[in-house]
Image: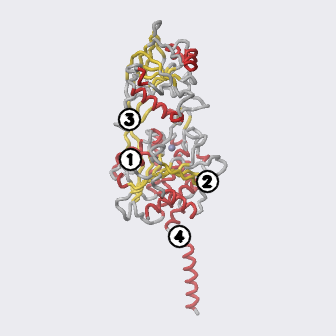
Amino acid sequence: MFKKTHLLILLIFSAWQLQHAQTPIDKGLAVINKNVLQSQLTFLASDWFEGREATTQGASMAADYLRSLFQQSGLQPAGDDSTYFQKVPLVINTLPTDASLEIATPKHNLTFIYGQDFLLQAPSSGYTMSGAIAWVGYGTDGLQQKKLKDRIIVRLSGLPENASKELLVLKTQELTNLKNKMAAEAGVKAILEYDPNDPDLKNLPSPTITRNPENPVSGIYSRRYMLPGEQTAEVPVVKISKSVATQIIPNLDKQLEDWRQNGVIPSIGATGTIQAKAANIHKSCRNVIARLQRSEFPNEIIVVGAHYDHLGSYDGFIWNGADDNASGAIGVAAIAAAFKATGIQPKRTIIFANWTAEERGLLGSRYFVNNFKQIKKVICYHNYDMIGRSYDPKKSDMAVSLMYSKTWPKAEILSDRFNKEHNLGLNINFSPWDNPTSGSDNAFFAKQGIPIMWYHTGGHSEYHKPGDHAEHIDWQKLEAIIKNSFLTLWELANE
Ligand SMILES: [Zn+2]
């Protein structure tokens, strides 16, 4: 009798254990928790970090905080000299501190004021340019036929109304780059650019940034960051105000109207001289990198990354970048913690990375890809950039895009499967991508032919504005996206 009772108790206990036994995956999922995410993200996107702009103290503190999360989870350091940090050297071009523009016409010689009448981009070296000024309209076609060698051109910004579809789809910066390239190929010495919609140069970064509560401009656009050895010689671009344009093209408005209506080329009889003094500063910033060592498959590595830098702090405003990209940086730390919580060593090595200087041209991830000796072993790259928002911050929509290399449909198959199997409730917009070599830190992995996947919850009205705050984050959705990633990566690491 006693024995039977004993056996029965044992059976009941075993059944209870079976029902409640946590699998390794359950243990991993259990540590991805919206309360933890909220506490970490809110701290990382707080004013203490001063907008985490690469090379600033705020960014150094952010890197150290993210290092502490990797270390706390028990990951191994994978940066320089057995640390969690990889030093990324930079060359920084600042706006010229001193510049001059002179316009000589048959009637007079005029000198203009830098910062008021004209503005410059950050050049990679100082220069003095002189030459006759020629008209090129918008500068989008026929430059080769215009005999522009060694000329200074005057160009309108933007595009004509009848521009081709190929040009109309370009983003502002892409269009500018293309127009500058055309000018360089035609042998142009310097470009004077006039924007009739901004006659007083109010919409551009100035060497003296003035506070405008209506439309604060982050100062990052007044400096250019590059990796050493990647500087390129460029045709200088000078943005001129209407006061300068009027001296070059007399009766400016009438001549422009005549040109638009009847194709009459504006008459110019002026030469220009431009001088700029440039300063190159050498600085460095840091990627934060940790490793989870494999148990099998020595030749296969997975990289999971997100940038932690943002736009900094200027003139009384702090760009906290809660969605862009504290959400992704905390997400990477959460996946790392979940892998450790399973108690199982994955079959494949995983590198977890928080990149620096993404906002400056994807420099942290680019530096990693250029210098990682085992880059040929990387079988896929998983990216987070902005994974925290619902379109309407007051209404959770559970929508997320998963962009992935078209040649690698597995990303979609796994992500879709785990969303359903674990009832994560995500509404995933799957976007296969022919050539994922732009947009975020996926770019330089994709250029190496490495398949990529990138979760992204889309643009919003606070994008790249000081208002990108933690209070707008959708915590439930953030948790679901990170769980989806963990499940997908777990499969990829152990299949
Ligand atoms: Zn971003």
Residue on which the image places disc 4:
22
The verdict on label 2 being within 8 Å of ligand 1 is: no
Choose mark 3 or mark 2, whichever is in front. Answer: 2
Numbered circle sitting on residue 368:
1
**Could you tell me which quadrant the N terminus lies in?**
bottom right
Where does residue 436 sit, x and y in percent of width and height? 46, 47
Name the kind of residue labelled 1 in the image. Phe
Numbered circle sitting on residue 398:
2
Tell me which label, 1 or 3, sits earlier in the chain: 3
Q: How is the image coloured?
A: secondary structure
Name the kind of residue labelled 2 in the image. Met
Choose mark 1 or mark 3, whichever is in front. Answer: 1
Neighbor class of circle 1 (other Cα within 10 Å; few <14, some 14-19, many 20+) is many
Please, what secondary structure does the residue beneath circle 1 have? helix
Where does residue 438 sit, x and y in percent of width and height? 46, 43
Residue on which the image places disc 3:
91
Choose mark 4 or mark 1, whichever is in front. Answer: 1
Tell me which label, 1 or 2, sits earlier in the chain: 1
Tell me which label, 4 or 1, sits earlier in the chain: 4
Residue 50 to residue 152: above or below: below
The verdict on label 1 being within 8 Å of ligand 1 is: no
**Distance from label 1 to label 3 (Cα)?**
16 Å
Tell me which label, 4 or 3, sits earlier in the chain: 4
Please, what secondary structure does the residue beneath circle 4 have? loop
Where does residue 238 sit, x and y in percent of width and height? 46, 23
User: Closest to the observer: 81 or 321?
Assistant: 321
Choose mark 1 or mark 2, whichever is in front. Answer: 2
Where does residue 141 sit, x and y in percent of width and height? 47, 27
